[in-house]
Image (cartoon, grey):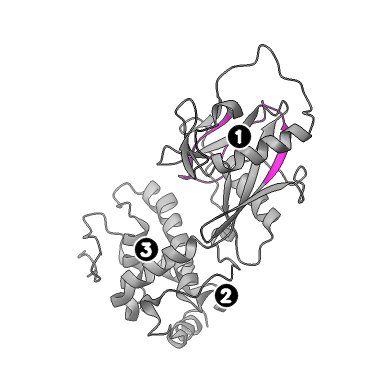
Amino acid sequence: MSSPALTGASTVPLKTGIPPKELLDDLCSRFVLNVPKEDQQSFERILFLVEYAHWFYEDNSVENNPSLKSFTLKEFTSLMFNSCDVLKPYVPHIDDIFKDFTSYKVRVPVTGAIILDQTYERCLLVKGWKGTSWSFPRGKKNKDEEDHTCAIREVLEETGFDVSKLINKDEFIEMIFGPQRVRLYIVGGVKDDTPFAPRTKKEISEIAWQRLDELQPVYGDVISHGVTGLKLYMVAPFLKSLRSWISLHQPPVLPKPDAPVRAISMWKQGSSLVTTMKSSSRVSNSSNKGPAPGQSFRNFQLDVFPLLQAIETAFS
C-alpha cells in the first residue's frame, strides 16, 4: 500500500513498514474516539491520547509484527493526524501543535520515591530504556491525581514494588526545575533482596541499588555524573536534603562490614522482563494550571463538533 501523504515542514519521510490503514483506524477509534469527551477538548489532551496510542503500537503491534516500522512520537503523530478523519483538518498545524505539546509536558508536575535500603546507604535507581542516565523512579501526574498516589503508581510501574503501605505523605523532598515541580517521597528500610521488575515494556532497562556515597557529584546539576562516572538525571539536586533526612533518622539495620562495595543490579532487560502494559491511567492529563498554550496556534481553535459527531456515529 502507498504511504500516507505527510505534510508539515519538519515531517520525517517514512520508509517501509507503514502500518496498514485498518490498524491506524483501530488505533484512532480506540484511543481518540472512544474516550471521555472531556479528553477531546484541547490539543494537549488529544496529544496525550496519541502518545498512548504510540506506546500501544510500539509495545504490541511492532513487537508482534516485525515487518512494521518503529516510529518516534512525532512521526507517529503525523501518521495519526493524516489517518484519522477528525484530525486531518489540523495536519498543516502539526509542527506547532507538537511543539506546544512538548512545552506543555515540561510543566506537568512529577512525583516519585527515593527508596532506601535498611542501612540507608543505598538507594534504588532505574535506568531508561534507550538512554544511559539513572534516576529515581518517578513520573508525571495524571489529571486530578494526588501527589502520593502518582508516586505509588509510578514506582509500581517502573520497579514492580508497591510502596503504598510504606509511604508517608509528609516525608518528601520537593524541588522546582524551571516550570516543573518534582516531589520525591522518602521510603526507607526496604530489604536489599526485594525482587524488582518493571511492569512496563520498553521504558526501564535496569534497576539497581546504588551507593549514596558514589552518587555525590561535584555540582548539584539536574544532569550530572557520580564519583564513579555514573550518569545521573534529577538525582544530584536531592542528595543534600536526603543526607539531612538520613542524619535525623536511625536506619533499621546497621551497615554490614561484608556488604558489597559497588552497586547491586536487581533487574536488567533480557532477564525476566514483565510484559504487563501500563494501565490507561498512563494517559496523563495533568491538572497543572501552568501558562496557557504558546503563541504558535492561538489563532485557531479546536473544532470539537466533528469529533463528537464522529463518536456518536461510530458508537451509536
Instruction: Say few, some or many: other residues with alpha carbon within 10 Å of mark 2 (under 14 / 14 to 19 / 20 or more).
Output: few
- Circle 2 SS class: loop
Residue 83 is at least partly visible in this image: no
Q: Residue furthest top?
A: 258
- The amino acid marked with disc number 1 is Leu
Q: Which residues are magenta?
A: 185-209
Q: Nearer the viewer, mark 3 or mark 2?
A: 2
| 190 magenta-colored | yes
Towards the viewer: 94 or 120: 120
- The amino acid marked with disc number 3 is Leu
Q: CA distance from mark 3 to mark 2?
A: 22 Å
Q: CA distance from mark 1 to mark 3?
A: 39 Å
Instruction: Say few, some or many: other residues with alpha carbon within 10 Å of mark 1 (under 14 / 14 to 19 / 20 or more).
Output: many
- The amino acid marked with disc number 2 is Pro
Q: Is residue 1 above or below residue 214?
A: below
Q: CA distance from mark 2 to mark 1?
A: 37 Å
Which comes sooner in the sequence, label 2 or label 1?
A: 2
- Circle 3 SS class: helix
Q: Which residue is mark 2?
A: 36
Q: Nearer the viewer, mark 1 or mark 3?
A: 1
Q: Nearer the viewer, mark 2 or mark 1?
A: 1
Towards the viewer: 43 or 114: 114
Q: Which residue is mark 3?
A: 23
Instruction: Say few, some or many: other residues with alpha carbon within 10 Å of mark 3 (under 14 / 14 to 19 / 20 or more).
Output: few
Instruction: Give the image location of residue 255, x and y in percent.
Output: 71, 19
